[in-house]
Amino acid sequence: MVPDLSQIKTPTGPAFWTTWITYGKPGSLMPAFSTAQGGPLSDLQIASLAAYLNAIYPSKVYSTH
C-alpha cells in the first residue's frame, strides 16, 4: 500500500517532494501535510523534510538529452 520511495519512476527533486508533502497525492493514501491544506506541517517543516528526502532518495531517472 505504501510506495517504495527509492523506486519512484519519475524525476524527483526538492520541488517534487515539496509538492507531494504539501498537497498529498490524489487517489492515494497520501494526505496533504501543509497547514494551509489542513495538515500539521509549516512551510519550514515541509522544506526541511523535502531537503531530507531529496538527500536520501536522489532522483534515479536521468535525461537522455
Image (spheres, rainbow, N blue to C red):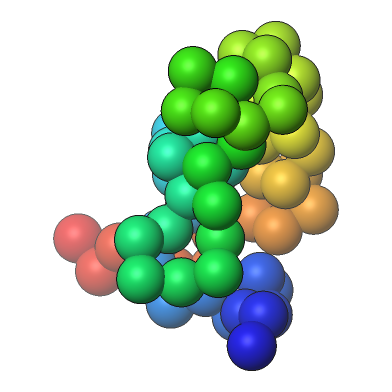
What residue lies at 66% left-to-right and 70% top-to-bottom?
5
Q: Is residue 27 left or right of residue 60?
A: left
What residue lies at 62% left-to-right and 32% top-to-bottom?
39
> Which quadrant, please, contains the N terminus?
bottom right
Image height check: is 1 above or below 56? below
Choose between 22 and 8: the one closer to the eye: 22
Residue 10 appears in which quarter of the rendering?
Answer: bottom left
Percent from the top left, x then y, of residue 44? 70, 11
State whether residue 49 appears in this view: yes
Q: Is residue 53 left or right of residue 37?
A: right
Image height check: is 28 above or below 52? below
> Which quadrant, please, contains the C terminus?
bottom left
Percent from the top left, x then y, of residue 6? 68, 74
Count the numbered circles shown: 0
What residue lies at 68% left-to-right and 15% top-to-bottom?
42
State whether residue 13 appears in this view: no
